[in-house]
Amino acid sequence: MQVLSLLQDNYQWVLSVLILLLYPKLVFLSLRVLDKTVGQREDSDRLQRVKWLLKTSLFVMILLGIMMIWGIELRGLLVIGSSLFALIGVALFASWSLLSNITSFLVLFIQNHCRIGSWVKIIDGGNFIEGRLVDMTLFNVVLETLDGNRVLYPNNLFIVRPVVVLAKAPEKSAKKIQKKQLPRITTSNH
């Protein structure tokens, strides 16, 4: 009888501990289903991102469940969530803000078109830059040109500019400098 009374008085703690103990098993089962479903058809980088996203989603759901057990109102979280959503929306349109670069990093993190090691050509109007993608940081993408120079290109510009993913490394072109001379004007004396 005392055990039952103890459980009734501390049911929030008991349920919270049970849910936290079930989290690793849920992750294991989810990843196993994902591996059976996807198999080796997908790229390993993309598969790692999906696994991370799956683990994070499960953690958020478990956290929300524990919050509901403890009687925390989810309406307040809804207000915070909608505010964050509006903030991210503004960040996508504010082209030079730091928040825009971070948001663009998250988009680059999820998409799978450009990977580290890929050769890319970024087109900006009549100009372009070619290089091998060396790193993706929180604020910029690092490109290494054929000359060995490193170019830091802001994430938000990398998202909005046309980017050509090259199948192979571009060839280094030797530019010949042509000397241009003005045409000579000859005057004839008659």
Image (tube, helix red, strand yellow):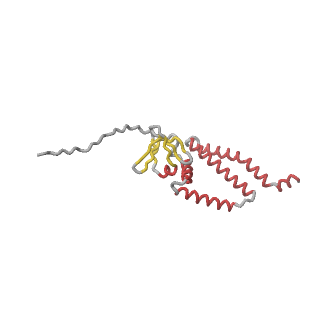
Q: Residue at x 48, y 43 (%)?
A: 151
Position of 69 relative to 36 (above/below): below
Residue 177 appears at what percent x and percent y? 33, 39
Residue 39 appears at what percent x and percent y? 59, 42
Nearer to the camera, 74 or 134:
134
* Image quadrant containing the N terminus: bottom right
Side of 90 relative to 184 (left or right): right
Side of 184 relative to 114 (left or right): left
Position of 79 relative to 41 (above/below): below
Residue 44 appears at what percent x and percent y? 57, 41
Residue 33 appears at what percent x and percent y? 64, 45
Total marks drawn?
0
Q: Residue at x 57, y 56 (%)?
A: 88
Furthest-front residue in this view: 189
Q: Residue at x 59, y 58 (%)?
A: 85
Nearer to the camera, 170 or 17:
170
**Image quadrant of residue 42?**
top right
Furthest-right residue in this view: 1
Nearer to the camera, 58 or 143:
143
Furthest-left residue in this view: 190
